[in-house]
Image (cartoon, rainbow, N blue to C red):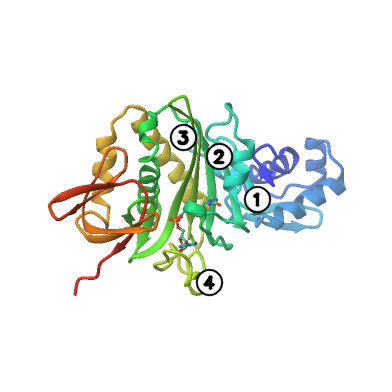
Amino acid sequence: MYSNDDSILLCVLKLLKSSNSRYVSGQEICNKLKISRTAVWKHIKKIRLLGYKIESKQNLGYRITRSTALPLPWEITSNLKTKQIGKTVYYFDTIDSTQNFASKISNQNNSGTVIISQRQTSGKGRLGRKWASPAGGIWLSVILHPKFDVSYATLFPIASSLALCMAIEKILNLKPELKWPNDVTINGKKVAGMLVDISIESNHIENLILGVGINYKVDTKKLNSSLKNSEHFYGAGSLLKKSQEANPTKLIQSFLYELEQICNILDNGNVDAIIKKWTSKSSTIGKKITVDTAGSKMSGKAVRIDKDGALVISKNGSEHRLLVGDVNYLRIR
Ligand code: BT5
């Protein structure tokens, strides 16, 4: 696990980064950081394993020639434009689920902490479903102790999928769509999903853990064949193609910024703005749909979402509100 407190490793890295492609000698690193030559060598090896390219020349020392493509904590926090979200970041190569780790460490003082993993062995979807989390995706959780009203708890997954949609538009220049309640899609394929674990005490939100799964640059062939028999599967897409260069840090930074804006809007109670924006990017509203909800099905026309995120369906002249469910679009022949 790495965090933005990883002191000596980070000091070595900072020294190399600040040298502006000049070689830094091993001796200079030893002197400045008061560590042994062996320690320097070990840290350089670790930094290389993290994906940074470091050239070394006898009698000259070391210099960085390429940064990492991994969303490491110090890369996320550097130039991050948020006030609170993402100021502390933990990064894992492999974890069972970032949601589990987040709920273990969550306390009243660490709102905004982000946990990222390269892979998850037991990634979770909603309602006890599995979430496939191979390398190449962005799997993260955000710990929040929000101030907003408890009645917005069910709107939050919708609002956070809007935040991700806006970040994808800005950073990758793509046009994703939003599928009620928590999916981000491209060409009708799921590229991201949100999971919200929440605890409510005496009518206020005590603890909220937002889980975000993004198929950033994943092998879609493998993913689709491993998922084809899973519950409510309608196809998985990837934001980036194999040939595209990955820079997940930029997307994560932009998402955390948009998420903070969304939280501020919710704090001020101005949910109409969120609903309007979500609706403009939604592939659900206006469509004839069937919603699977707790074992039963309801078909009708999706007309709007309410302030609490409920999907309103009109059927035979009357309206029905649904708070949980999975939408299937009816094919128009
Ligand atoms: C979701 O659930 O979409 C919520 C996904 C949240 C995952 C994140 S990753 C970081 C954090 N840590 C975790 O352990 N979880 C969160 P739901 O709407 O219930 O969708 C689950 C369904 O999506 C599955 O039953 C599959 O059909 C499908 N699915 C599973 N993995 C997928 C993937 N990688 N891409 C597209 N579809 C997938």
First in sequence: mark 2 or mark 3? 2
The kind of residue on which mark 4 rests is Ser
Choose between 2 and 275: the one closer to the eye.
275
Foreground tag (3 vs 1): 1
User: Can you tell which mark lies on residue 77?
Assistant: 2
Can you identify the residue that label 1 sits on?
Answer: 92
Give the Cα distance between marks 1 and 4.
23 Å
In this figure, which residue is indicated by the disc labeled 4? Answer: 226
Q: Are marks 4 and 3 in contact (CB under 8 Å)?
A: no
Task: Kindly report which numbered mark, 4 or 3, lies closer to the viewer in this rendering.
Answer: 4
What is the CA distance from the residue labelled 1 to the residue labelled 2? 16 Å
Q: Residues within 10 Å of mark 2 (few under 14, many from 20)?
A: some
Q: Nearer the viewer, residue 140 or 39?
A: 140
Position above or below: 82 against 54: above
- Pinpoint residue 75: horizontal percent, then vertical percent: 58, 45
Residue under the point 87% across and 48% down? 38
Residue found at x 77% / y 52%:
60
Along the polypeptide, which appears first: circle 4 or circle 2? 2
Query: What's the residue type where badge 2 is placed?
Result: Thr
State yes or no: discs 3 and 1 in contact (Cβ < 8 Å). no
Q: Are marks 2 and 3 in contact (CB under 8 Å)?
A: no
On screen, residue 249 versus residue 307, left or right, reads right
Asked which secondary structure carries label 2, the reply is helix
Mark closer to the chain start, 4 or 3 = 3
- The amino acid type, in three-letter code, at marker 3 is Thr
Relative image position of residue 176 (x, y in whole percent): 33, 57
**Which amino acid lies under the numbered mark 1 shown in the image of this protein?**
Phe
* Pointer 3 residue: 82
Q: Residues within 10 Å of mark 1 (few under 14, many from 20)?
A: some
